[in-house]
Image (spheres, rainbow, N blue to C red):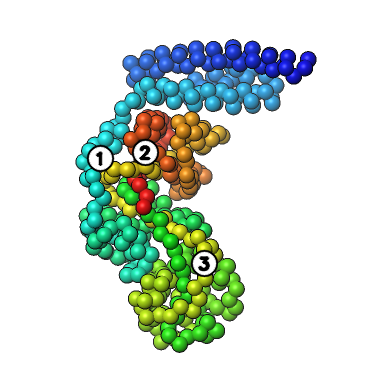
Amino acid sequence: MDIEALREQINDCDEVLSKTFVRRMETALEIARYKKEHGLPVFDPARERAVISRVTEGCDEAMAVNMKLLYNTIFDLSRTYQQRYMSSQTELTNHIQQAIERTAQVFPRRAVVACQGMEGAYSQLACDKLFSLPSLMYFRRFEGVFQAIASGLCEYGVLPIENSSYGSVTEVYDLMRKYRFSIVRSVRLKIDHRLLAKPGVKLSDVREIVSHEQAIGQCGAYLKGLKDVKITVFGNTAEAAQFVANNSRNDLAAISSPACAALYGLTVLADAVSDSDSNFTRFICIAKDLQIYPGANRMSLMLNVRHTPGALYAMIAKFAALGLNLTKIESRPIAGTDFEFMFYFDLDASVYAPEALQLLCELDAGPETFTYLGSYSEV
C-alpha cells in the first residue's frame, strides 16, 4: 500500500477515536454529577489501575507501555473535566475574590519593610525601588524577615529569590514553604558588582576578599583568575564592605555595590568582576495576608506532585492545555520524606483570566498538596 492509502486508514481510525473520545468525556461528566451528589472524590486510583489492567491485557509489552501512556493522558483530561464541573468555586477562589476586593487600588508608597542585610545592601536598593518612602528594618538572616512579618513588626518583607547567572536562593524557597506568606510584588534589580578596598590599597596587595555567597558565585570566573587570595563568605555584600572599611588591614577587599563604595568611603579596584554583563537579581515582596493589586499578571504556586512516573509531566501538560506560560519551575526536597519534592511554579497568568482561575480550582480540588503563593506584577 502507498502512503496515501495508509493515511486514509489513519483518518478512519481518527474519526472513530474522536467520536469515542467525545462520548467518553460526556460519560465522565455524568459520573462527575453522580460524584458531586454523593460526595465522592474525583480521583479514584483503584478504578484507574483496573482500567489500565483491562486495556493492556493481551497487548505485547511495547504496546502495553504505549497504551498505559495514552490512558494516563485520558485519565488526566477526564479528571480535569470532572473537577471543572465539581469545583467552579472553591474556598481558594472565594479567598482570591475577597483579596481583590479589599486590596487598595494603588501599591503603597509608604510602609514598614523588613529586609536582610544593612544599609547599602542590594535588598535595600530593591526596597527603594518598590516603595517610595519605606521605613526599613534590617535582619541578619532571611528567616528574620519572615519572623518580623509573622510577629506584626512590619507588614512587608523584601527578599532575593533568584539571580540570572547564579540561580535560585534556595533558602528563601524553603522559608516560603515553611511560613506560607503571599507574594504581593516583585522587582528585577541590575546587579553591578565591584571589587572595593580602602583608599591606597592596590589589587596586588589584596590577600582576602569578602562578600555574600551569591555575589561570590556570580563573580566566580574573576575570582578564579586571582592567585593566593582567600575568599570569605559574609552575611551580605554591605556587611562585607563595612568590614573592609573598618578594618586596619590593608590586604582586604570586598565584592559589593557602587552604593557601598560611596557609603563606606571605599575605592573601586575592579569594575568588571561579574561573570555576566547582564546580571539581574529578582526580589519578591511578601506579606502575611493575601493582597492582589491591580495589574497582577504573574502567579506563583507550590505543589507536591505525586511520586509516580509521569506525574510531573501530567501537571505541566495541564498548564499547557490551558494556554498558561510556565516561566519557572524549581524543585526542593521535602525534609523527612523518601525523595519527595515540592515544586515551585511561576506563571505568566492574570488572576482575572478564566483559565487561571480554572487552574487554581482544579489544583485546589485535586489530590496534590497545593499552596497558592499569590498573584502580582513585576517592576
Q: Please name the residue that numbered disc 2 is placed on.
A: 350
- The answer to whether residue 197 shows anywhere in this view is yes
Q: Residue at x 54, y 26 (%)?
A: 73
Q: In the picture, residue 110 is in which quadrant?
A: bottom left
The front one of 273 and 366 is 273
- The answer to whether residue 166 shows anywhere in this view is no
- Give the mark, 2 or 1, whose residue is nearer the N terminus: 1
Q: Please name the residue that numbered disc 3 is placed on.
A: 274
**Quarter of the image that includes the N terminus:** top right
- Give me the C-alpha separation between circle 2 and circle 1: 14 Å
Which of discs 2 and 1 lies nearer the camera? The answer is 2
Assess whether mark 1 and mark 2 are in contact (beta carbons under 8 angstroms): no
Q: For residue 99, which numbered disc appears in the image?
A: 1
Total labels: the figure holds 3
**Which secondary structure, mark 2?**
loop
The front one of 275 and 237 is 275
Left or right of 68 in this view: 348: left
Query: Callout 3: 10 Å neighbours few (<14), some, many (20+)?
Result: many
- Residue 64 on image: x %, y %: 65, 23
The front one of 193 and 49 is 193
- Give the mark, 3 or 2, whose residue is nearer the N terminus: 3
